[in-house]
Amino acid sequence: MLNKISNINNGVDFRKSKKFNQYKRNGDSSYSSRENEHDTIKISPALNFFDNSSWRLRNITESSDERIIISFEINDYELNVAIDSSTLHQVSFLKFSAGKIVNGNFRNKKIQIDILVELTRFYRINNYDNLGMLDLLFERSLNLNFNGELTKNDKILIKEISGDIITGLQKEFEAISCGVLSFIESYTGKKVDLRKHDPPLMDNHLVIDKIKMLDG
């Protein structure tokens, strides 16, 4: 069944985009939109969503193909996710990239883990920072002590470090997904609805797609 979702890609190639807007937080807790080097305007108050949350918005980008790319921080993690705003009425998956610099025995390591989440329910939430299972996944990844990437081809090794925490990890990313979609509803003015699969396309509704570790 995973073959049905193996080609999901939330990335955006800006070299192919005719136009994009970027939104960044200003020092006064307001936000601005930058369309080019010279034009800056105030934008949607929906971004105040983050003012009432422990999440910290780093950047939000709109591409010409209607994708919204959000970069935000929870605790010490930077998370990135792209959402197709034209298909909010039938959302099935979100793909997150979670990154963090961690202290190794002899040097810092930069770890990035890509996680694909199958959405089974949606509730509105604007704050969630209990990431104990993600902490454990990063700790175990660090203990593997490698430089490079683990992919789905290394599923046995990935399962060894995640098998007993995958259910908890799914609960954490379900809450994060609901928070992201709650913001997107406010930001776009569009109602979010899920397209559920029966049976589910993946066990535990979550797949660790890639683990990447480099010297930090």
Image: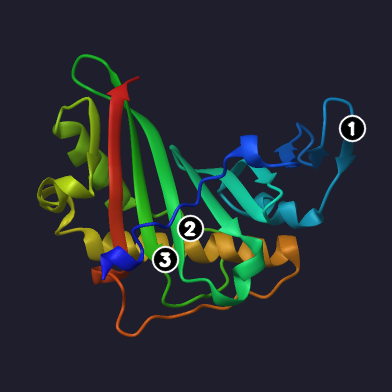
Mark 3 belongs to which amino acid?
Glu
Give me the residue at 81% from left, 53% from top: 44
Q: Which residue is mark 3?
A: 174
Within-10-Å neighbours for mark 1: few <14, some 14–19, many 20+? few
Q: Secondary structure at mark 3?
A: helix
CA distance for labels 3 and 1: 37 Å
Residue 126 shows up from this direction = no
Image quarter in which the C terminus is found = top left
Is 50 above or below relative to 174?
Answer: above
* Marks 3, 2: nearer the viewer: 3
Ranked by sequence position, the earlier of labels 2 and 1 is: 1
Q: Residue at x 47, y 59 (%)?
A: 176
* Mark 3: few/some/many CA within 10 Å (<14, 14-19, 20+): many
Task: Give the structural element (helix, strand or loop) at label 1.
Answer: loop
Q: Kindly identify which residue carries mark 2.
A: 128
Mark 3 or 2 closer to N-term?
2
Q: Position of residue 14 (x, y in %)?
A: 63, 38
Instruction: Please name the residue that numbered disc 1 is placed on.
Output: 39
Q: Amino acid at mark 1?
A: Asp
* Image location of residue 100, percent across then percent down: 39, 34
Residue shown at 20%/14% (left/top)?
Answer: 106
Residue drawn at 34 percent across, 58 percent down: 6
